[in-house]
Image (spheres, rainbow, N blue to C red):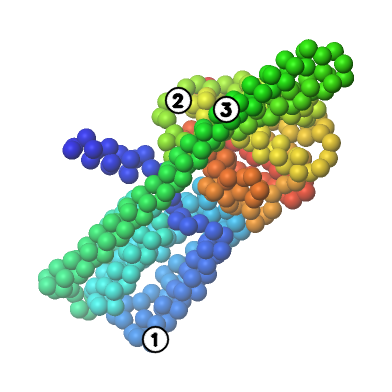
Amino acid sequence: MWHRASRWLKEEVVTSPLVPVLHPSPLRMKGLGLFTLFGHPLFWFVWAVWIPQPYENLPLRLFTASTGLLLLSKRISSDPTSRLSGHVFTAVFWFELPFLFSWMYLCNGGNQAWLASMAAMILTYYFATDWRIATIGLTAGGLIARILFEFWGPTVAMPMTTEILLTNTMVIAFCVSMGLLLGVSSANLRREHLAHTLTTMGIMAHELRTPLATMALIGDAVRGAASERNNGAGHKLEELAARLHLLVRNMNHQIDMQIANARLMRLPGHKEAVRAADLVREAVANYPFRSTRERESVVVDVKKDFVFEGSHALFSQVIDNLMKNAMRSLAAASTASLPGDLTIEVNAAPRHGRILFRDRGIGISAEAQPRVFEPFFSTNRGTGHGLGLAFCQRVIDSAKGTIRVKSEPGHGATFTLELPILR
């Protein structure tokens, strides 16, 4: 029983990735920014003029409103899934919700208006961000507000009695417990849904190997029949057999990728020293190019090699996923393959190593770029499953690295991987 409970706690609290912004989208980020920018001056008017409360603070409201400009900035709102956006969102919402509301609650003596406001704030905070961030944020915000109130808080006209304090504490505790329960349940449901979907895809991909094995046997039979003929028909059969074997190899390669992507929520903890140049060269050598011309379009440029800590197998899959996306983009460009259509550059700075994938494909629209790392989002509606880049980001995050994309439609795309250097 204790073992099961400890395993559940580890999975829920430690292993599960933090999601600073729930349901991220540029429109939602801008909406929250606008609400912050215009909402706090409006609340000041309500509590200071329309329904006057014992304490209000216009400079504090205006400062809080100005933090909404951070959420409205293009760098933050255009990519709400990025690490920077998550940090900014977490900081703004912590100041705006648990800290500010706790301060106002204390300064107003915990009256009815601010008790109701605290209850609404707690539930909103748990709805907007990860339950672990919300719990830590509420605790820190309440403690810091209390400390500041003791030293610099105004004199409260009607201090809280013991009965009011106990009543308010019970109401706030109930809101926290409900927010915590709903937050944990929601996070667990999201992970279970994603894990079950990925497992099903992995099983389906694995089952495709049986008909592919049959196709490979048919290809061997055709090749055997071709060897018995020395005329043009035999040469034609040999070409058909070669194309059939290439198709089987490509399909098996895609299946391997699907099964690897199905590990999105179950990345192993084992890490090793990985040399970037060897990793890239090996992945390029093993990639199932459709032709010699396509192979020659890939150029590996090692400016300065580096070693990082991670899983060699998983990072091979990352390189493979990024190459596959680049090849698909180049094929959609409808131009003949040329050397340098895809350049993979390995370079290193004092603290971080960098692997760049720069292609001359069709590019990615500005609207799609902030979402390309979301699970199940794909720019290729025909065949894309939307897991490849989500898998890449998860693997890179596990190595404390980052991945970002820069693209202009019609002018290709550049994916940049930055990883901490081991040595």
Q: Judge the density around disc 1: few (<14), some (14-19), many (≥20) Cα neighbours within 10 Å.
A: few
- The answer to whether 362 appears left or right of 144 in the picture is right
Please give the residue where the numbered disc 2 appears in the rendered image. 271
Q: Position of residue 180 (x, y in %)?
A: 29, 56
Q: Residue furthest right?
A: 232
Say which label, 2 or 3, has the lower sequence index.
2
Q: Residue type at mark 3?
A: Ser
Coordinates of residue 147 in the picture (x, y in percent): 27, 59
Kindly report the distance in space between the C-alpha atoms of the residues bearing marks 3 and 1. 63 Å
- Kind of residue indicated by mark 2: Lys
- Which disc number belongs to residue 316? 3
Vertical position of residue 33 compared to residue 363: above or below: below
Quarter containing the N terminus: top left
User: What is the quadrant of residue 277 in the picture?
Assistant: top right
Q: Nearer the viewer, residue 354 or 396?
A: 396
How far across and down, in percent of the image, does residue 235 sit? 83, 19
Q: Residues within 10 Å of mark 2 (few under 14, many from 20)?
A: few
Residue at 50% of width from left, 57% of height from top? 24
334 with respect to 31 (left or right): right
For mark 3, give the secondary structure: helix
Where disc 2 sits, the SS reads loop
Going 87% across and 19% down the picture, which residue do you hit?
A: 232
Q: Is residue 279 left or right of residue 64?
A: right
